[in-house]
Amino acid sequence: LIYYILKFNEYRTKELAFLGAFLIGFGLTNQHTLVFFAFPMVLWCFYSEPKALLTDGKAFLTLVMCGLVGLTPYIWLFPAATYAPLGSWGDTSTIEGFLTHFLRKEYGTFQLYSGGDKQEAQMITATYRYFLQVTEDGLYFGMVLMLVGVAWAGSQHMKSKRISPFLVVFGSWTFYLVVFHSLSNLPIDKLRLFLGIHMRFWMQPHLVSFMFIGLGLKPLLSTVGLWKKPVVIGVVLGLIGLQVALNYKAMDQSTNNHVEAMGVAHLKHLPKNTILISQGDVVTNSMRYLQRCKQFRTDVLLLDETMMTYAWMRERQAPHMKKWKIRFPNTLHSPNPMPNMETYTMEEFLAVNGNNPDCPVWKAGAWLGEVMGKADSGVPSWHTVPVGLVSKVLRKGQEMSNREWLEYFNKPDLFPPVLDFHSFGDDTWEWLVRRIVLEWRAKTAFKYSNMAVESYVEANVTRAMDEIRTVLELEEVAHGHETTSYILADLHNAMGMLWVRYQDYIDDPEEVISSNRKIAFHFGKFVALQPNHNPGSQESNLVKFLNQNPNYAAKISPTDESKKKTQQKAAQEQLASSTPPEEAKGKKEKKEKKEKKEKKDGNSTKGEKKKKKKDKKPKDPNTEAEL
């Protein structure tokens, strides 16, 4: 477009104007922000040649038609709407639906962001950030060249308006920066990821900025008598080579498949014909790509909870969901029931779709109700059990058996590889992928830690320690500099609890002292890192006591040998069979009552008591570790 505006400035022919109109329309089918560059150019063309383009009716209509021809790719949206494959956005089968889609009304026309924390009136701040980025991308001396180039081009314009295109190019560049930064409402000061999204819209003005950098070479080289073809070519190639040498390693994304790997980890181990309710752009789109482009796990129904908040979701895509027997309770989903609107809550959706064993419901990402601050995440009758990057959705009172959960947990590829923290900045989607993977690794590790503590099996406790320790080390890389951190506090709390349980398997006083110091360390971190922690809490008092008594040689929670043995056997039964947790719990309670009765009646012999005291490890620890 810039090339043809320069040619038009030189030759002023109608044919070049017609071609420019087509390019504008064609460009808008890819990126709407092009209008901020195109609008000043169109005005300039009309101003330059008013008789040939503006007052000539035939020429004006031809310009309009050329622009419309450029927009013709949008026609595809009408036939595409007739089959609306799963995951397609909007309903473009009608003129109203097409205009809603074309004008981005659901996000807000000429807005980037529709969230409640959108940031207004940031034109000065965002423009300042842009010039900081130009300075960095131009290797700092590029900013000097750009200023020289603008000044030189401006002086040429003053000498001869006809041969200098400075006014239109500089005007379009300025218009784009001012208008775009005035309309952009992403909260770029709250989250670096939003700044990264915002920065993608700087590619267009960057083209012009670096044109001015190139122009800045002429007066500088001319001043020292080096404006000669071999010298100019050498300097330009040298600058390009310098950029490649400095940035190639960081910019090389040829092996970057992190988003795809996360999508695979979400889908791979789900049961057949799962209904997977997702929330979040990168979570949903990573799986959508695999299903649509690679035909991977197409038996899984991927339901984007955000898309469910639009009426067209039921109207256009429900016919594709017959395999999973999906029923929508009403027209559109809303965590907050709206009067005068045909809405349904996720609680209502699960009530009619969450009880089919042939199509189990799982969750990826947070509930939309949780994002909106709803109590019980907007699903008070349901809860989720984390297994890898997804969670199984169950009615409250129902649980996954330990055996079923461990079948998932023991899969070697349950999680994708964790990205190196220093490889991607926090303004990239890869940073968010790392954040998501670590969050769900922590949730899964917490689940296993609870199972390990309740099992009274040493192998389970040590494995849980390894799981928590691994996540803790990774999280400390990202959050170790923070004075408060919920995730680090929770991880240290889990490690402290595991060390308390581990004391059941040690008797040597030195080992007990060492474990107590570890307990004091982890609970101390928990107290220090947790925001608004109660200084009189049980953990605070324990830390204070242990720090005052660094050689304390007694166990924090003396072992109840009877309960330990009972729990071990119950754990073995649950892990080795498909016995439901409720039934296993009942058996455990009956056995505890029986043992208490035998102890009370004096039926237990001294030899049996000695055996209980001695037998602190499971009979078959290797089997327990494998389970």
Image (cartoon, helix red, strand yellow):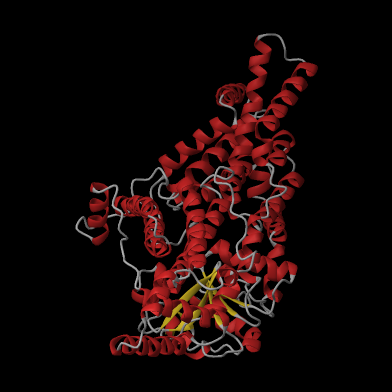
Image quadrant assignment for residue 434? bottom right
Q: Which residue is drawn at 40% across and 78% down?
A: 607
Q: How far from the left and from the top, in percent, is residue 399?
A: 47, 82
Q: Which residue is drawn at 59% across and 68% down?
A: 622
Foreground: 142 or 321? 321
48 in relation to 119, above or below: above
Q: Quadrant of the C terminus?
A: bottom right
Count of all numbered marks drawn on residues in the image: 0
Foreground: 589 or 526? 589
- Extreme residue in the top direction: 224
Can residue 112 be seen here? The reply is yes
Foreground: 505 or 145? 505
Can residue 304 be seen here? The reply is no
Q: In this view, does 510 lie to the left or right of 73?
A: left
Image quadrant assignment for residue 72? bottom right
- Extreme residue in the right direction: 230
Q: How far from the left and from the top, in percent, is residue 579?
A: 52, 87
Q: Is residue 321 left or right of residue 509?
A: right
Q: How far from the left and from the top, in percent, is residue 409?
A: 57, 70
Q: In this view, does 117 lie to the left or right of 350?
A: left
Q: How far from the left and from the top, in percent, is residue 16?
A: 74, 44
Q: Residue at x 41, y 60 (%)?
A: 506
127 in relation to 332, above or below: above
Q: Quadrant of the N terminus?
A: top right
